[in-house]
Image (cartoon, helix red, strand yellow):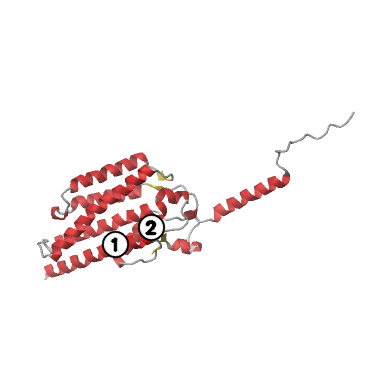
């Protein structure tokens, strides 16, 4: 009786050395994924509701503006804003983890309309103050100016959130490794958890501090569009705050 030859696995069967190399590559990939900051890799994406809630607050503030500070098509534009935000929430109510050109165009159109409404209100308020028109009592003026200032903060917060590294969906995919805004956690990763990545609250804080300090605070703009947008926001905030406060102090006297 003769011994049967060992079975031939064929030329396609992986050799032990090849299997070991593949295992090492997979282990290295998993290690890099575990140690790589979340803002550089593929993640689950952000929730839609923080930005949707901010837009809803902006619409409420726009409705509460005095009639003289409202664009003549205010109600039509507010209706457009409300319709767009409802469409965005209905089409993607959960996490923003997959890009959609159609939804992105809707999002940018929404912020553009909101910016138009607030830009008109800010320009009209500044014109009333400069030309010496009747702006009501000091309290009325401070309330109107504060309303315009706050809408300005919320509008630019959504702009930053929508544009940084291609938007929330692209950030979730990790397809843009070069940031437009350098948050402290990016430059000092040892001071932040591995799963940290910028979310809407970080962009809201960025917009608020930029409006208060008229300059970057802890977050630095890197791209030219980021610098230009922060410059515009600071200029609007400075003009509105300075003129409103000066006019209100004069009215108190």
Residue sitting nearer the eye, 20 or 176 = 176
Residue 7 at x, y percent in the picture: 78, 34
* Dot label at residue 202: 2
Marks 2 and 1 sit apart, C-alpha to C-alpha, by: 19 Å
Q: Quadrant of the N terminus?
A: top right
Instruction: Please give the residue where the numbered disc 1 appears in the rendered image.
Output: 232
Q: Residues within 10 Å of mark 2 (few under 14, many from 20)?
A: some
Q: Is residue 104 left or right of residue 6?
A: left
Q: Position of residue 114 (x, y in %)?
A: 26, 51
The kind of secondary structure element at disc 1 is helix
Please state which of residues 78 and 248 is positioned toward the viewer in this rendering. Answer: 78
Q: Residue at x 22, y 60 (%)?
A: 146
Mark in front: 2 vs 1: 1
Point 34% across, 42% down: residue: 89
Q: Is residue 195 visible?
A: no
- Quadrant position of residue 4: top right
Q: Residue at x 38, y 57 (%)?
A: 202
């Amino acid at each position: 009786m003769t011994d049967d030859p060992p079975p031939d696995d064929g030329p396609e069967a992986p050799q032990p050395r090849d299997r070991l190399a593949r295992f090492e590559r997979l282990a290295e990939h998993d290690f890099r994924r575990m140690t790589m900051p979340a803002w550089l890799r593929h993640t689950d994406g952000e929730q839609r509701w923080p930005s949707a809630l901010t837009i809803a607050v902006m619409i409420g503030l726009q409705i509460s503006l005095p009639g003289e500070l409202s664009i003549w098509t205010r109600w039509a534009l507010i209706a457009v804003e409300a319709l767009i935000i409802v469409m965005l929430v209905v089409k993607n109510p959960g996490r923003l983890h997959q890009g959609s050109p159609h939804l992105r165009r809707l999002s940018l159109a929404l912020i553009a309309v909101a910016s138009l409404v607030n830009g008109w209100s800010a320009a009209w308020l500044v014109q009333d103050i400069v030309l010496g028109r009747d702006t009501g009592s000091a309290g009325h003026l401070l309330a109107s100016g504060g309303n315009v200032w706050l809408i300005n903060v919320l509008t630019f917060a959504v702009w930053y959130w929508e544009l940084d590294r291609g938007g929330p969906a692209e950030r979730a995919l990790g397809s843009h490794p070069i940031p437009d805004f350098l948050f402290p956690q990016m430059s000092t990763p040892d001071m932040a958890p591995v799963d940290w990545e910028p979310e809407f609250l970080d962009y809201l804080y960025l917009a608020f501090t930029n409006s208060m300090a008229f300059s970057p605070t802890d977050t630095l703009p890197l791209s030219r569009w980021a610098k230009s947008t922060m410059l515009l926001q600071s200029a609007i905030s400075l003009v509105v705050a300075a003129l409103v406060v000066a006019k209100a102090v004069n009215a108190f006297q």
